[in-house]
Image (cartoon, rainbow, N blue to C red):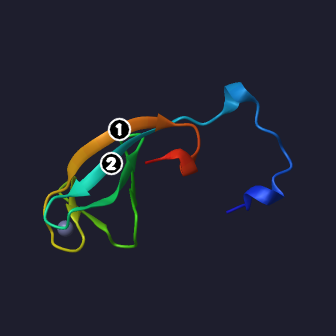
Amino acid sequence: MTSSGMLVEHEAPRQRVRIAWLELSCLPCGEVAGYIEDDRIVRPVYPGGIVLERGKPRCGRCNALLFGGQRGVAISRSDIG
Ligand SMILES: [Zn+2]
């Protein structure tokens, strides 16, 4: 991965990435387990935080089914959440 400080190219506004994200929360743990980006990339907030079981996201801690919370569109990865 390239550090943002090392980027030479400047992104044109129309080339910006748009990431549709959906927050996945665990009710028993009471916290956000991670996010789904563009309906296909599962990104846990901590390693192993999300386990996929038959295509359904489950909590890596307590194995409860995660439910979708807030969603939105981010223009960069750091905007998610
Ligand atoms: Zn949990």
Per the model, the C-alpha gap separating discs 1 and 2 is 6 Å
Q: Which residue is mark 2?
A: 23
Seen as rendered, the residue at the extreme top is 14
Position of the N terminus by quadrant: bottom right
Secondary element at image label 2: strand
Seen as rendered, the residue at the extreme front is 30
Q: Is residue 53 left or right of residue 73?
A: left
Q: Residue at x 24, y 71 (%)?
A: 60
Q: Is residue 61 left or right of residue 75?
A: left
Residue 79: x and y in percent read 53, 45
Q: Residue at x 43, y 48 (%)?
A: 81
Q: Sort mark 1 into few (<14), some (14-19) or many (20+) by Cα contacts within 10 Å.
A: some
Q: Quadrant of residue 70?
A: top left
Looking at the image, is mark 1 or mark 2 earlier in the sequence? 2
Q: Quadrant of residue 62?
A: bottom left
Q: Is residue 79 left or right of residue 46?
A: right
Q: Quadrant of residue 12?
A: top right
Secondary element at image label 1: strand
The quadrant of the rendered image in which ligand 1 is seen is: bottom left
Amino acid type, residue under disc 2 in the picture: Glu
Q: Sort mark 2 into few (<14), some (14-19) or many (20+) by Cα contacts within 10 Å.
A: many
Q: Residue at x 22, y 74 (%)?
A: 61
Amino acid type, residue under disc 1 in the picture: Arg
Q: Is residue 9 left or right of residue 67?
A: right
Query: Contact, CB < 8 Å: mark 1 with mark 2?
Result: yes
Q: Please count the marks in the image.
A: 2
Q: Residue at x 56, y 51 (%)?
A: 78
Residue 68: x and y in percent read 24, 45
Q: Which residue is mark 1?
A: 71
